[in-house]
Image: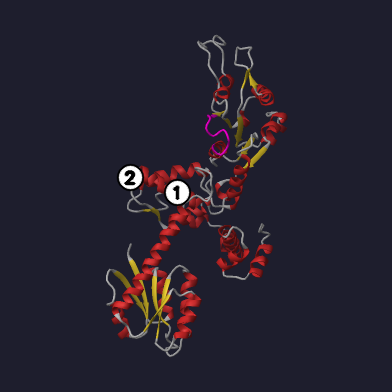
Amino acid sequence: MIKKLLIVEDDPGLQSQMKWCFEDVEVHVADDRESALSLFRRVEPSVVTLDLGLPPDPGGSSEGFRTLEDILRLSPSTKVIVVTGREEKENAVKAIGMGASDFYQKPVDADILSFVVNRAFRLAELEKENQELVESQPATKLKGVIASSPEMLEICKTIEKIAPVDLTTLILGETGTGKELLARAIHDNSLRKNKAFSAINCAAIPENLLESELFGHEKGAFTGATAQKKGKIELADGGTLFLDEIGDMPLPLQAKMLRFLQERVIERVGGVKEVPVDIRVVCATHRQVRDLIDEGAFREDLYYRISEITLQVPPLRERHGDAIVIAKAMLKTFAKQLDRGSLAFSDDAVKCIQTYPWPGNVREMINKVKRATIMSEGKKVTAQDLELPNCDDEIGEDLFNLRQVREEAEKKAIRQALESSEYNMSRAAKLLGVTRPTLYSLTDKYNMTVQ
């Protein structure tokens, strides 16, 4: 990683002297607040040395403090080393209180200055590595489930609560939202986790074969039944049965499924013997079950049997912040699988991932990220590699409503601070840089639960 240093100093002689103190460092120099902020935005240095005496107040420190505030506002993680005179200890202390990471007193000593700056670089590097490690860990405890949005974290909490209890669960959501992944998470966190997880898609099997697939058949039950066969239900004995797209199950089979859920016994096709089966049932569908009931295509009594607990999985476009988190995790996985080394998304790709509506949800994202991993050149995956439309065209007017953007950013920051502090209001307020009364006012303003 290239070390980038910005020196903010108005004395040409000191500029030259300081530049030659560093090796293997990309050094940039500015002599006033305006040029310093312009360079800072363009170069994004991780370390800045800042002389407080800048024009138009070279004999004072007001302009230097303004520059310090602006830099930390743009990038709070930047390490700012304030350069002061020997008689300016009060200014050094004040700068540290404002967020500067260190201070250095003139006159310039090349060895000491180099040591202080390199220490700041190392600190910045360690913080970045720690942040990347934190971000690489899923926000949920559920294996395979990647989520950071409040919407999905709430679902994950519900799964953690219901998994140990044998409740029949119905998962609703658009195609591609990861309903089977959540069903597996329920199984993996249940007391049945060491037993079978048996899945069947009710929409993918012809009606005349579905009953046999579910309940099994006896030898000679129909043409081609040359031997006894156990069905998915029986094979899942002791474990979990996942009925995907149950909304497409034929009505005659719904009656048989209802009896099984009530009695917990099955009869194989062509058989007369009742076989007891101990399983947990998890169902899913992208259909509107209430509409199916009104149309007479789905039994209401079966609906009540399968929906002891109902999970409504939001589409990806409604999971605030999840798209980029999931995309980054996928890119890391595919890059490793395809031996592409370390890949990252370009700025335009990040912007498009966040604004694209993802009509095919996570399933669509998997296809696009995998293709982009193969097709990308260099270390950056672009929006073009992802075959995403120009995201500038996708941005609605709401994104230009400054009040709305600010409120959304505030809500997100408050939510993250509360979660990071385990809802300790004092710690959360400190993370946000506000007082406890202010934080309480903000949570009341946004109707946020503080526990």
Percent of width and height locating residue 139: 52, 51
Q: Which residue is mark 2?
A: 339
Amino acid type at image mark 1: Ala
Residue 209 to residue 85: above or below: above
Magenta range? 188-199
Q: Residue at the location (56% across, 15% down)?
A: 217
Q: Secondary structure at mark 1?
A: helix
Q: Which residue is mark 1?
A: 329
Amino acid type at image mark 2: Asp
Marker disc for residue 95: none
Residue 389 to residue 80: above or below: above
Counting residues from the start of the chain, the first of labels 1 and 2 encountered is: 1
**Where on the picture, by quarter, is residue 305?**
top right
Q: Is residue 401 visible?
A: no
Q: Residue at the location (53% across, 54% down)?
A: 321
Q: Is residue 69 magenta?
A: no
Q: Secondary structure at mark 2?
A: loop
Quarter of the figure that contains the N terminus: bottom left
**Where on the picture, by quarter, is residue 232?**
top right
